[in-house]
Image (cartoon, grey):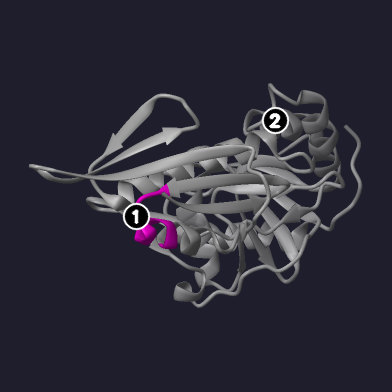
Amino acid sequence: MNELVLETHGLRIAVRSNSAMLLEQLRNRTASVAAQSSGTPQLSYTIEERRGESGLSYAIRCGTGRMQRSTTPREALDAVLRRMQLHVAEEAPDHIFVHAGVVSWEGKAILLPGRTFSGKTSLVVALLRQGAAYYSDEYAVLDRCGKVHPYARPLQVRVAGGSRLWTAHMLGAEVGSGPLDVALVVFAKYHLTSCWQARPVSPGNALLRLLANTVCARKRPHEALACLRLVAVEAPAYVAMRGDSGDAVKPILDLLARDSKVGRKL
């Protein structure tokens, strides 16, 4: 078995496979969020490529846990990456992971919280096409001071019949390179026939909404609340209904321009 050990956000994870090609693809897909390491891993995955009468298949195992089967290398890698990212989001010792898209506009971070299938990736893509810098389409990674850090994995854009992996550079966008204060939080809900409507919410309301999107909220509630409180106090927050992502870009940027960053009380 070949082995690749990755280190990210204070955690080391080993992935073993009898396919060197799979590990190389995994290394490429995680290059922006993880570094190779030689240390002792805290978690391990195995991807075994098997050849049978019906062709190739892939058996995936986390540690000594239950095995999952996939029929394509892309499906196998996606399954491992989902589990790895969730593990890191739950256990990273110095960061709080919030389900959110994140972009930077003129050096100011915009958080777009939302779970999978909420449309946050399409909104991030629309902002990138207008000149925003890319931070994340999946997690807002917050440190203990409430600053957001880049988590610039390839964007997984859903298209008819599946999904495609895009990089920020394919969209003509830059990738963020350092931590930023959060300047605006928009909880945008997509509906096909909606026109843009937004209303401000209080810091307390924003805190509860951020907590509902925080991966480690149940495991590490005190750490999560301490971090999220800093964001909720400092950054204006809005709840919005939106239709097409492109139509939401200007209203979001208008909110950012209108709201000066002033301290607020919970």
Residue in the picture at 68% in, 50% down: 39
Q: Position of residue 94 (x, y in %)?
A: 79, 43
Residue closer to the observer: 154 or 242: 154
Per the model, the C-alpha gap separating discs 1 and 2 is 40 Å
Tell me which numbered mark, 1 or 2, is placed earlier along the sequence.
1
Point out the stretch of residues depicted in magenta: 17-24
In the picture of the structure, the residue carrying the numbered disc 1 is 19
Residue 86, numbered circle: none
Let me know if residue 229 is in the magenta part.
no
Is residue 155 left or right of 208 when viewed as pictured? left
In the figure, 116 relative to 244: above or below? above
Is residue 65 something that shows in the picture? yes
Residue 128 appears in which quarter of the rendering? bottom right
In the figure, 250 relative to 99: above or below? below
Mark 1 or 2, closer to the camera:
1
The reply to whether the C-beta atoms of the residues labelled 1 and 2 are less than 8 Å apart is no
Is residue 7 left or right of 248 when viewed as pictured? right
Residue in the picture at 85% in, 41% down: 230
Give, as a three-letter code, the residue at label 1: Ser
Circle 2 Cα neighbour tier, 10 Å, few/some/many (<14 / 14–19 / ≥20): many
Give, as a three-letter code, the residue at label 2: Leu
Residue 198 appears in which quarter of the rendering? top right
Circle 1 Cα neighbour tier, 10 Å, few/some/many (<14 / 14–19 / ≥20): some
Q: Position of residue 191 (x, y in %)?
A: 41, 41
In the picture of the structure, the residue carrying the numbered disc 2 is 211
State how many labels appear: 2
SS at mark 2? helix
